[in-house]
Image: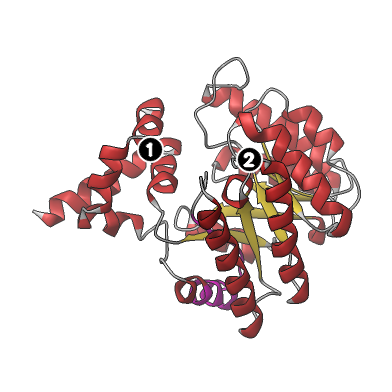
């Protein structure tokens, strides 16, 4: 099922059908709280009022022309300005994808770095930070080079590592130094067994191995998972290592486990919600289904209600 859903995420005919099908969009609304900047800012405000934090992502990746890349950058600059004007930057940062910043264009690493620096400059001006998202394994090295370059001028720039990749424990060791903000997630892309663990038990074990490395380091660990097994293990590690409260946070995707977000926040942990917004929601939504095919039940109920 996971492989099928990931394949459908790349199928243009299925995408066209989904974009024009109201019941599908009704389900998407659970995971994507809006299409424009107003929606994103309003969502962050609601999370702040509930004692939660946010990292905001304007949906869109693999931008394949300069105009699309510039539109992405312009949207982030507007978003940051709006978050600052609404006094929300103490509770919100932004997440960006290298491929949305021009990584796939000719001379892509230079273009992506130039655009990332523009966004980091705007974020710093309003008192917040940027996290550079990770994509599939083919872009891992380029994305980590982008992270390293951004940190030369903006040391608070966050990075993301995917536990399912075989290489990640070594990346965790290298990126667990003082002040290093690293989000550890399982990984949402359909990766081959040659580069990644592909079964749930193996991915869980890999996640825990990587998490132990990060928590024993000197950086800020961003524990990104909805898995109850991993959350309870993380809580045990935090207690055993006596980590300061400000040296870690839990992160979850918008709409996936809101009750668990509240539980962790009530227990004194910082909880940050990944808030995606925009019109390019199809690929993101399909990856959410691939991660947890039980979410298909939501779509099924919407279809029945439509009839």
Using the rendered image of the protein, determine whether residue 51 is visible from the camera's viewpoint.
no
Q: Say whether residue 147 is left or right of residue 83.
A: right
For marks 2 and 1 on the same chain, the one whose residue lies earlier in the sequence: 1
Crowding near the residue tagged with mark 1, few <14, some 14–19, many ≥20 C-alpha atoms within 10 Å: some
Crowding near the residue tagged with mark 2, few <14, some 14–19, many ≥20 C-alpha atoms within 10 Å: few
Most foreground residue, 232 or 302: 302
Q: Residue at x 80, y 53 (%)?
A: 150
Quadrant of the rendered image containing residue 105: top right
Taking the magenta stretch, the answer to whether it contains residue 46 is yes
The answer to whether residue 223 is above or below residue 37 is above
- Quarter of the image with the N terminus is top left
What numbered label is drawn on residue 9? Answer: 1
Q: Say whether residue 265 is left or right of residue 209.
A: left
Q: Residue at x 71, y 42 (%)?
A: 109
Tell how many labels.
2
Residue 75 horizontal/vertical position (percent): 55, 67
Residue projecting furthest to the top: 194
Q: Residue at x 85, y 34 (%)?
A: 173
Q: Which residues are magenta?
A: 41-59
Task: Name the residue carrying label 2.
Answer: 106
Secondary structure beneath label 1: helix
Taking the magenta stretch, the answer to whether it contains residue 86 is no
Most foreground residue, 90 or 282: 282
Residue 298 horizontal/vertical position (percent): 29, 49
Residue 156 horizontal/vertical position (percent): 82, 58
Q: Residue at x 75, y 45 (%)?
A: 146
The answer to whether residue 91 is above or below residue 283 is below
């Amino acid at each position: 099922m996971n492989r099928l859903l990931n394949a459908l995420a790349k199928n243009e005919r299925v995408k066209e059908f989904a974009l024009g099908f109201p019941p599908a969009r009704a389900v998407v609304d659970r995971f994507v709280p809006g299409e424009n900047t107003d929606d994103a800012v309003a969502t962050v405000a609601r999370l702040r009022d509930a004692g939660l934090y946010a990292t905001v992502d304007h949906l869109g990746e693999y931008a394949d022309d300069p105009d699309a890349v510039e539109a992405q950058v312009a949207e982030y600059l507007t978003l940051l300005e709006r978050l600052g004007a609404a006094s929300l930057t103490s509770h919100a940062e932004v997440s960006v994808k290298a491929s949305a910043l021009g990584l796939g264009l000719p001379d892509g690493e230079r273009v992506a770095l130039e655009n990332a620096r523009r966004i980091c400059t705007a974020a710093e001006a309003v008192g917040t930070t940027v996290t550079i998202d990770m994509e599939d394994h083919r872009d891992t090295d380029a994305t980590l080079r982008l992270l390293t370059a951004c940190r030369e001028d903006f040391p608070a720039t966050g990075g993301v590592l995917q536990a399912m990749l075989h290489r990640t424990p070594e990346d965790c060791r290298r990126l667990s130094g003082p002040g290093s903000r690293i989000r550890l997630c399982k990984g949402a892309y359909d990766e081959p067994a040659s580069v990644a663990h592909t079964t749930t038990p193996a991915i869980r074990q890999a996640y825990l191995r990587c998490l132990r490395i990060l928590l024993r380091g000197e950086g800020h660990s961003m524990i990104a998972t909805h898995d109850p097994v991993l959350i309870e293990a993380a809580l045990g590690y935090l207690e055993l290592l006596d980590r300061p409260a400000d040296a870690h946070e839990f992160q979850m995707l918008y709409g996936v486990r809101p009750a668990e977000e509240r539980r962790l926040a009530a227990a004194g942990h910082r909880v940050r919600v990944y808030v995606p917004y925009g019109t390019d929601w199809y690929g993101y939504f399909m990856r959410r289904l691939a991660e947890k095919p039980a979410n298909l039940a939501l779509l099924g109920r919407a279809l029945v209600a439509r009839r």
